[in-house]
Amino acid sequence: MIDTRKIVSRLRTIESLAVIPRVASTNLVARRIVNECVDNELSLPQAMIIAREQFAGRGRNQRSWSSPAGKGIYATTMLTRPAAEMPLVPLQMAVVIATFLRENFAIQAEIKWPNDVLAGGKKIAGILIEARVQEGRGYMLIGTGINVEPVKDDSRPNATSIREAAGREVGDLDDITRRFIEHVDAALSESFSRDDVLANWRSLTVHREGDPISCVLGDRTVAGTWNGVDEHGRALLKSGSSVTPISAGDIILGIDQEKQP
């Protein structure tokens, strides 16, 4: 069992912590809180909501995120940031989650743009960020899903979990969740540095210069090669002599990358 008061007492950024047995979506709960605070000119609490189970969890583009009871960490962190920092928060959070897996479980986690976290080429964690901007401040909801235990689900053939990727005993879900909370809090307590975020993301990405990729943009797909990310965190897709910055979309890895172990 997680003692929320005890954990919060030693955190530096997260001021409030709630653990809910079952909920439709932690982002949905957090969204209501943010809207209430913004609409009534109240300060947004720097808080984290964790659910043991979600029955309507969502990823990017309204895709469902499987969140069965006792199998993962399903969390939303509420955070206020200057609006100018917001474009790099997805990359920053991907780095936070990848380093959490590396430092705690020796999992060689890598990042697929912008913020899918992979282990052995399979998805182990995902991040969905929503925000409201008002008077130069971004009120952010950082939804995070991490697979902890294996789930037998034919709809997720390219998914893995901490226990599978680590290949050893990793502790129970409560212990892993406590470590997750403390890791995220420590990372968010550090001063924001655009250069550091970009450097760390680039050091952990699965993408390599010249790799063949395609990007799904709404109802069309653009193909080319990977040309890195720019200072705003946008993916750069090179096609011939032109380079196109991509700020939203789904990156599909090339055939050669998909065959890598």
Image (tube, grey):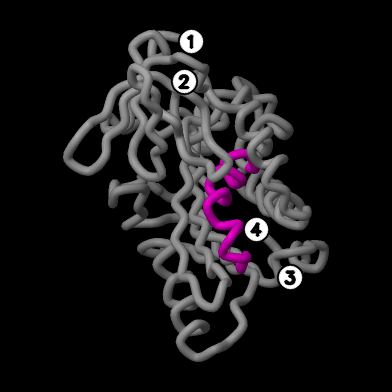
Q: Nearer the viewer, mark 1 or mark 3?
A: 1
Q: Nearer the viewer, residue 210 or 60?
A: 210
The reply to whether dot 4 and dot 1 touch (C-beta < 8 Å) is: no
User: What is the three-letter code of the residue carrying label 3?
Assistant: Arg
Please provide the residue range marked out in magenta: 80-96
Label 2: element kind = loop
Q: Residue at x 45, y 87 (%)?
A: 39
Residue under label 1, please give it. 261
**In this view of the protein, can residue 22 be seen by the observer?**
no
Q: Nearer the viewer, mark 2 or mark 4?
A: 2
Q: Nearer the viewer, mark 4 or mark 1?
A: 1
- Dot 1 or dot 3: first in sequence order is 3
**In this view of the protein, can residue 227 be seen by the observer?**
yes
Q: Position of residue 192 (x, y in %)?
A: 72, 53
Residue under label 2, please give it. 121
Residue under label 3, please give it. 5
Question: How far apart are labels 3 and 4 at the CA level?
Answer: 12 Å
Seen in the picture, residue 29 relative to 93 is either above or below; the reply is below
Question: How far apart are labels 4 and 1 at the CA level?
Answer: 37 Å
- Dot 2 or dot 4: first in sequence order is 4
Q: Residue at x 79, y 63 (%)?
A: 12
